[in-house]
Image (cartoon, rainbow, N blue to C red):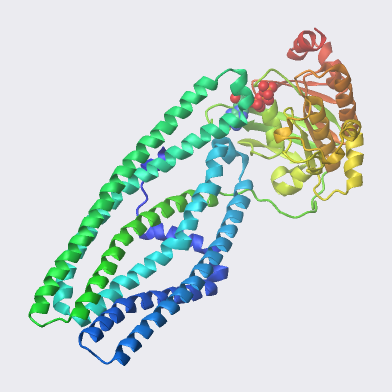
Amino acid sequence: MEQAAKKPRVTASGLKKIARLYQYAKPHRWLFALGMLMLFLSSSATLLFPKLLGNLVDAGQKGNIMEHINTTGAMLVGVLVAQAILSFFRINIFVTVTEKSLASLRQATYSHLIRLPMKFFAERRVGELNSRISADIAQLQDTFTTTLAEFIRQIIMIVGGIVLLGITSWKLTLFMLAIIPVISIVAVIFGKSIRRFSKEAQAQVADSNTIVEETLQGIFNVKAFANELFEIGRYKKKTDDVAKTGIRVGKYQGVFTSFIILGLFGAMVAVIWRGAILMANHELETGQLFSFVIYTGFIGGSISGLAEIYSRIQKSIGATENLLEILDEPVEILSLTADVRQPITGALSFDEVSFRYPSRKDISVLNDVTFDVQAGWQVALVGPSGAGKSTVVSLLLRFYDPVSGSISFDGKPASSFDLTDLRRQMAVVPQDVFLFGGTIRENIAYGDTNAPEGSIIAAARQANAWDFIQAFPEGLDTVVGERGVQLSGGQRQRIAIARAVLKDPRILILDEATSALDSESERLVQDALEKLMKGRTSIVIAHRLSTIRNSDLILVLDKGRIVEGGTHEELMMKEEGLYKGLGELQFLG
Ligand code: ATP
């Protein structure tokens, strides 16, 4: 809705923004220039057409010898053929340039988008970002292929037409010029209100699409809460709004079109009327009036066409602004190379780290969190819900930077490491395992996209996943279904573990699943995790005593502070404490 409120104007700065996108067309500029040349030639040929037609009429009327009639006729055919050929190549060239430029624009936008920091994604909806890459770029496609060519052709038509008319009869030209600009000004005013509504309609369509996307993605919740009726209502309201706005746009468009028809034909009648008077005074010949009328039609059409082009350019500026908004967001500094250049051992420390989420600056999520972890340690984070455990992990992965205090790896500040390097040496096995819609193989190989089949199988074995994978008829090539719905919870987890095994991280981050698996599945997952944790630092957001008992360090978080820290025995020995309480209640109880 916010989008509909701001109407982009076709201003110098708006055009400059479009020009910025032209960098994606730059590699094809010579081809583009060739297309422009053809456009220029074919428009000029169109311009010749009425003149030659007029000559033909005059040649016939004056009873000229047949030869003259035939030459003019042949010239006309020549012009037509030339125009047909030029148009064919022109369209092909423009489409080629556009498609290639849009592909690079799409690639640039996506590669920018995916490198934006987590903070950006926390504040936007997926559907909205999706439409940036699809709808806004489609809008630009229209501009590059047709709008630009139309614009240039119409300018040539108007200027060339007026010049040629002036040569034929300046009196009639002045008369015509007194009428046409009036029509065009009214047309522009009309065009403006139409544009405002169509922008509004675009935003409403995007809103309604977001509902479809979100509910389909979260179909589980919609069904489980039996909220189908609610969602249908929500969608109905949005789409009804879209229709209302669309109908309003249609009404304006209807009036606009009627006006153009009236204006155009009215002008035509006036010009012929005036031309007939001039002919009666022998100031004009029949053929000249004939070509005059056709030129006037061309000019009138071109001027009203310009209004349409103006609106399309305006839409493109809107789309460009949306795209540039993404392209101007600062990206994370990622070194998109394959090798790890700064290896870490897995020792890490938090030093008086405090943190607030950028989207909720008034709430302090972590306060003076300090702890040291030696390489190879197993660390458990425990504490009530909302205590800040996941936030500690997000900071470790450098999704966000602390507001104050510092995090270091191997004694060196986290900021001195390359972001890609750090994340390459960490692996996360999350609570809600996210699988991509492809095959089991692709999902495991996400941990190391270059891994050979042998390593993938070895990883699957170590994750206790090989047995069930093998039992599928298609083995590793079994399709897991959208988000892995065709696998059980325990199977998904073991695939996520295999993925982490393949990555062979120095630091393993484990968000223990709270949902209970059956005991056999549980044992397999637990066993796989224990194998995975061996020989590396692991940070476990723990919900089960079995995982915690052997930890080298247990950190108890409460309301963003570390309230207790130590081994299980140390913490249990305390007279009273959160851990002991939690332990008795949750783990032992
Ligand atoms: P749980 O055990 O329930 O997962 P947790 O200990 O992991 O909880 P966090 O997820 O770290 O807790 O959340 C700590 C606090 O930060 C919560 O109050 C939460 O509302 C807030 N929070 C989490 N993510 C964000 C975010 N992206 N933007 C703003 N606030 C957030």
Expressed as whole percent of the image width and height from the top left, the position of residue 315 reads: 41, 52
As displayed, is residue 128 above or below residue 180?
above
As displayed, is residue 520 above or below residue 331?
above
Residue sitting at 75 percent across and 55 percent down?
337
Classify the position of the C terminus by image quarter. top right
As displayed, is residue 410 above or below residue 20?
above
Count of numbered tags = 0
Expressed as whole percent of the image width and height from the top left, the position of residue 21 reads: 50, 60
Quick one: which residue is furthest to the left in this view? Answer: 281
As displayed, is residue 148 above or below residue 385?
below
Expressed as whole percent of the image width and height from the top left, the position of residue 247 reads: 34, 39
Classify the position of the N terminus by image quarter. top left
Residue 427 in view in this figure: yes
Is 112 left, or right, of 57 in this rendering? right
Q: Give the camera-side residue of 343 and 142.
A: 142
Q: Give the camera-side residue of 347 and 445.
A: 445
Residue 346 in view in this figure: no
Residue sitting at 25 percent across and 86 percent down?
59
Q: Give the camera-side residue of 366 and 432.
A: 432
Is 472 left, or right, of 58 in this rendering? right
Q: Give the camera-side residue of 574 and 275.
A: 275
Expressed as whole percent of the image width and height from the top left, the position of residue 121 reads: 59, 39
Residue sitting at 37 percent across and 40 percent down?
246
- Quadrant of the image where one finds ligand 1: top right
Is 4 left, or right, of 538 in this rendering? left
Is 256 left, or right, of 561 in this rendering? left
Q: State which quadrant residue 174 falls in.
A: bottom left
